[in-house]
Image (tube, rainbow, N blue to C red):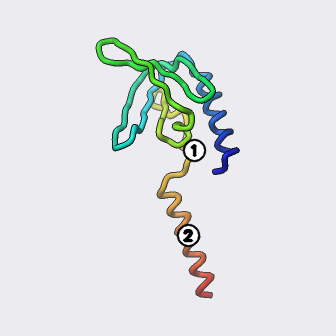
Amino acid sequence: MDLAKQAKIVDSIHDTLHDFVGQRLKVRANMGRSKIVENEGVLTQVHPQLFIMEVDRKRGRTARQSYQYVDVLTGMVELSQNGEPLFEPFVPDAEGMLADESSVASDEEEKVLS
């Protein structure tokens, strides 16, 4: 995926999230080292490079967390509302990529054998 296409996708994520300001969303973030954090909260602000959510904590407390649009693009952060994801995966999964690569390799083998 080239940079121009990525920039357009990030802009579309920003525009979509701008429409959800003030609404409750569920966020699932991959923090690395097999640590996945799931929170629910209200989308409070959108900025050019990131968005801010006020998430629920224990005993009625809230915390503010920020996420980058690029993380949504890469699938490190997933957003959903009422169980429905807001965005479809933008980057194909590894299995899909391997399947494409194997079909290309088998085509090349067929050409060599011919």
Q: Is residue 35 above or below residue 21?
A: below
Q: Is residue 48 left or right of residue 22?
A: right
Which residue corresponds to the image point at 64% horizontal and 39% vertical from the top-left? 9
Q: Is residue 62 above or below residue 12?
A: above
Mark positioned earlier in the residue sequence (1 or 2) = 1
Q: Secondary structure beneath disc 2?
A: helix
Q: Residue furthest bottom?
A: 114
Q: Please state the horizontal and vertical placement of residue 45, each as a whole percent of the image.
A: 56, 19
Which residue corresponds to the image point at 53% horizontal and 37% vertical from the top-left? 72
Q: Please state the horizontal and vertical placement of residue 83, each as a whole percent of the image.
A: 45, 30
Q: Amino acid under label 1?
A: Phe
In the rendered structure, find residue 103 and report the number of the disc placed on it: 2
Q: Quadrant of the C terminus?
A: bottom right
Q: Amino acid under label 2?
A: Ser
Q: Residue furthest left?
A: 59
Residues at circles 1 and 2 in contact by the CB criterion of under 8 Å = no
Q: Residue furthest top?
A: 60
Which residue corresponds to the image point at 52% horizontal and 37% vertical from the top-left? 71
Which residue does the numbered mark 1 point to in the structure image? 90
Q: Is residue 103 left or right of residue 34?
A: right
Q: Is residue 54 left or right of residue 105?
A: left
Q: Please state the horizontal and vertical placement of residue 36, each as a whole percent of the image.
A: 36, 37
Query: Would you call the spot at circle 1 few (<14 residues within 10 Å), some (14-19), or many (20 or more)?
Result: few
Query: Mark 1 to mark 2: distance in Å?
Result: 22 Å
Q: Is residue 9 above or below residue 26?
A: below
Q: Secondary structure beneath disc 1?
A: loop
